[in-house]
Structure formats: C-alpha cells, structure tokens
Image: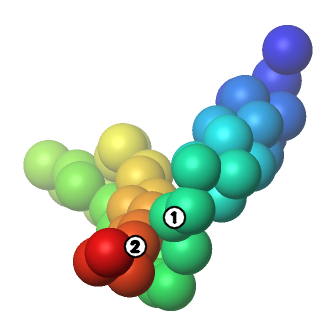
Amino acid sequence: MSNEAMIGNKIQQLSDQGWELYNTAGGVYSADTSTGIFITRYLFRRVKK
C-alpha cells in the first residue's frame, strides 16, 4: 500500500471516529538546499461532548 493510500485510510478512520481535519501544514527540514525531509502535519479537532 502506498503512503498516500495509508494516509487517506487513517484520515478516514479518524473521521469515522468523530475527528475533523481542519488544517494541514507542509514543511521541509534540511541541513542544506539539496536534501531535506518533507513533512505534512495534519491537524484534527473533535467537538467536546
């Protein structure tokens, strides 16, 4: 299974549990300009009951 499919499945699972994806933030961490670790942060929230 691809990374994209695993992320999509996890987002769907969290949504089914009542979580709402309300923001994403992309970023890159690198020591120089030719290499890096690319990340995406997914921010969820759930209404308090």
Disc sitting over residue 46 in the figure: 2
User: Who is closer to the viewer here, 34 or 28?
Assistant: 28
State which quadrant residue 47 falls in: bottom left
Say few, some or many: other residues with alpha carbon within 10 Å of mark 1 (under 14 / 14 to 19 / 20 or more): some
Q: Secondary structure at mark 1?
A: loop
The figure's colour scheme reads rainbow
Residue 37: x and y in percent read 36, 44
Q: Tell me whether circle 1 and circle 2 mark residues in contact (CB < 8 Å).
A: yes
Mark 1 sits on what residue? Answer: 19
Locate residue 29 relative to residue 45 in the image: left or right.
left
Residue at the location (58% across, 50% down)? Answer: 17
Q: Identity of the amino acid at label 2?
A: Arg
Q: Identity of the amino acid at label 1?
A: Trp
Q: What is the C-alpha distance between the residues marked 1 and 2?
A: 5 Å
Above or below: residue 19 compared with residue 12: below
Residue 11: x and y in percent read 65, 51
